[in-house]
Image (spheres, helix red, strand yellow):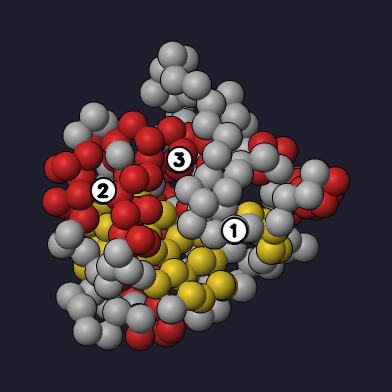
């Protein structure tokens, strides 16, 4: 399993993302669940289209995979994901994303892919990479843990997927509206002994 982990959007190594799927069919599963809290649907759809356009410009074929359609149906989700070379998880609210991943079984599927070293690329940015660490503590300063678009009955998830042993802190010292809060999140993580790696917008962590 390979990882292309960007601070914001595709970042500055887009050619590398394409190279990482050289032998595949160039199909991308685009997961936008981190934005399920959004009420301005026009703005959300426009943002999705911009992200998808970036991927298509690289030569990828992109399909939106709505995790809500797979809540309580992880077998169908895993069968769907088998057809893709890349799973791309966009930014938004990390706590909402964690809830969608749990309710759909995506969390266990991606951890299984990691264990068996499946030939697939996990890529994404912002919330899509924050979720890979061991904890969401620190990220709570940037994202709202109380966002519950799937119902108040679901408890807030504070654990990440623990695929990485550190938390990625995106938008560090960047021209991004969340950059100042990221500074505060890093202060929290230092004070609470949470391992982290800061990423400036444009920077990418690549794991092969």
Q: On the rendered image, what quadrant is the N terminus found in? A: bottom left
For mark 3, give the secondary structure. Answer: helix
How crowded pointer 2 is (Cα within 10 Å; few <14, some 14-19, many 20+) is rated as many
Q: Is residue 4 visible?
A: yes
CA separation in Å, label 3 and label 2: 13 Å
Which residue has dot 1 on it? 165
CA separation in Å, label 1 and label 3: 19 Å
Residue at image coords 14%, 43%: 76
Nearer the observer: mark 3 or 2; the answer is: 3
Q: Can you say whether 37 is above or below 119 in the image?
A: above
Which residue has dot 2 on it? 65
Give the image quarter of residue 159: top right
Q: On the rendered image, what quadrant is the C terminus found in? A: bottom left
Residue at image coords 34%, 45%: 108
Q: Earlier in the sequence, mark 1 or mark 3?
A: 3
Q: Can you say whether 67 is above or below 121 in the image?
A: above
Which residue has dot 3 on it? 97
Q: From this viewpoint, which residue is outermost toward the top?
A: 153
Nearer the observer: mark 1 or 3; the answer is: 1
Residue at image coords 73%, 50%: 194
Q: Is residue 192 left or right of residue 208?
A: right
Q: Residue 130 placed where, x, y %?
A: 56, 52
Residue at image coords 30%, 49%: 109
Q: Residue 105 placed where, x, y %?
A: 30, 39
Q: Residue 193 placed where, x, y %?
A: 78, 49
For mark 1, give the secondary structure. Answer: loop
Give the image quarter of residue 138: top right
How crowded pointer 3 is (Cα within 10 Å; few <14, some 14-19, many 20+) is rated as many
In front of the other: 170 or 164:
164
In front of the other: 80 or 32:
80
Q: From this viewpoint, which residue is outermost toward the front?
A: 115
Q: Earlier in the sequence, mark 1 or mark 2?
A: 2
């Amino acid at each position: 399993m390979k990882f292309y982990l960007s601070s914001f959007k595709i970042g500055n190594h887009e050619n590398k993302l394409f190279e990482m799927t050289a032998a595949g069919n160039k199909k991308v599963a685009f997961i936008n669940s981190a934005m399920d809290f959004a009420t301005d649907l026009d703005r959300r759809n426009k943002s999705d289209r911009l992200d998808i356009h970036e991927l298509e410009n690289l030569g990828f074929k992109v399909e939106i995979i709505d995790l809500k359609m797979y809540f309580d149906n992880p077998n169908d989700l895993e069968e769907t994901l088998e057809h893709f070379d890349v799973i791309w998880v966009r930014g938004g609210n990390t706590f909402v994303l964690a809830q969608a991943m749990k309710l759909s079984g995506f969390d266990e599927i991606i951890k299984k892919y990691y264990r068996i070293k499946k030939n697939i690329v996990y890529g994404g940015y912002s919330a899509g990479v924050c979720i890979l660490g061991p904890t969401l503590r620190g990220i709570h300063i940037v994202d709202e843990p109380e966002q519950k678009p799937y119902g108040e009955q679901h408890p807030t998830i504070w654990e990440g997927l623990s695929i990485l042993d550190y938390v990625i802190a995106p938008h560090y010292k960047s021209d991004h509206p969340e950059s100042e809060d990221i500074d505060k999140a890093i202060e929290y993580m230092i004070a609470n002994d949470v391992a982290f790696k800061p990423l400036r917008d444009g920077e990418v962590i690549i794991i092969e």
